[in-house]
Amino acid sequence: MPFLPLGPAGDTFAGALGVTMAVVLVGGPLALRWQRNRHHFILAQAALAKGITRFPKGPPFWLLSLRQGITALTLGVGLLIVGSVACGLTWRIDPPAVATGLMATTSPAGVAFAGETPPPRPGHDAPPGPNLAVEEWHRLQEINSLGLMMVGSGFILSLLGAMRIAFAATERRYWRDEEQVP
């Protein structure tokens, strides 16, 4: 089924629209950053032309490092908690009997099939429907895997945040205010 009922023209339009949206989504932020940097450069040039050499100070670098460290640590701890809860809720879920092959079914002739799909009965050529118990077990296994990934990511982010906070403490110890030093 085509994307648009217009045939090849519709597909061409859809492709052009997709490319345009990709350029806008990727190129837009880059163009805005370039424009902002250009304006900062023009502003700094104008200030230097008028003899202004001292610009207003921003926060010290150690404070920025501390803020980044606390943010990374908080995100890491949050991922650790959510991932641990997800793993804890889905840790010991046993697979359903159908998935392990323990459930036995019988064919119309009375022959037992253990864990296999029985042959279709005469007049019933439709395949059996989806097994909801197996699908639920697979969904829980996916949640468990996502939880493990979240725990690993949270651990790494927590370490990164802790190291950034430690670096902020070192930066603060050796930081000196430009106005205090002659």
Image: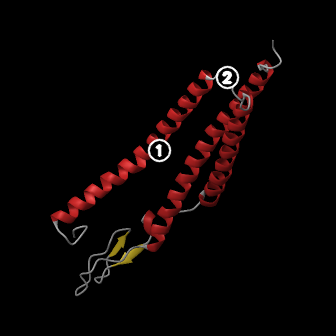
Q: Is residue 18 left or right of residue 94?
A: left
- How many numbered badges does the structure rendering display? 2
Q: How far apart are the two marked residues, 1 and 2, measured between alpha carbons?
A: 31 Å
Amino acid type, label 1? Pro
Mark 2 lies on a secondary structure that is loop
Where on the picture, by quarter, is residue 131? bottom left
Q: Which amino acid type is shown beneath numbered disc 2?
A: Ile
Determine whether, in the image, residue 21 is placed left or right of residue 94. left
Residue sitting at 56 percent across and 32 percent down? 40
Does label 1 or label 2 sit earlier along the sequence? 1
| Location of mark 2 (residue) | 52
- Residue extending farthest to the bottom is 123
Position in image of residue 73 (x %, y %)? 69, 40
Residue tagged by mark 1?
29
**Residue at point 59%, 59% (across, down):** 90
Res 102 visible: no
- Whole-percent x and y of residue 30? 45, 40
Q: Position of residue 37 (x, y in %)?
A: 52, 33
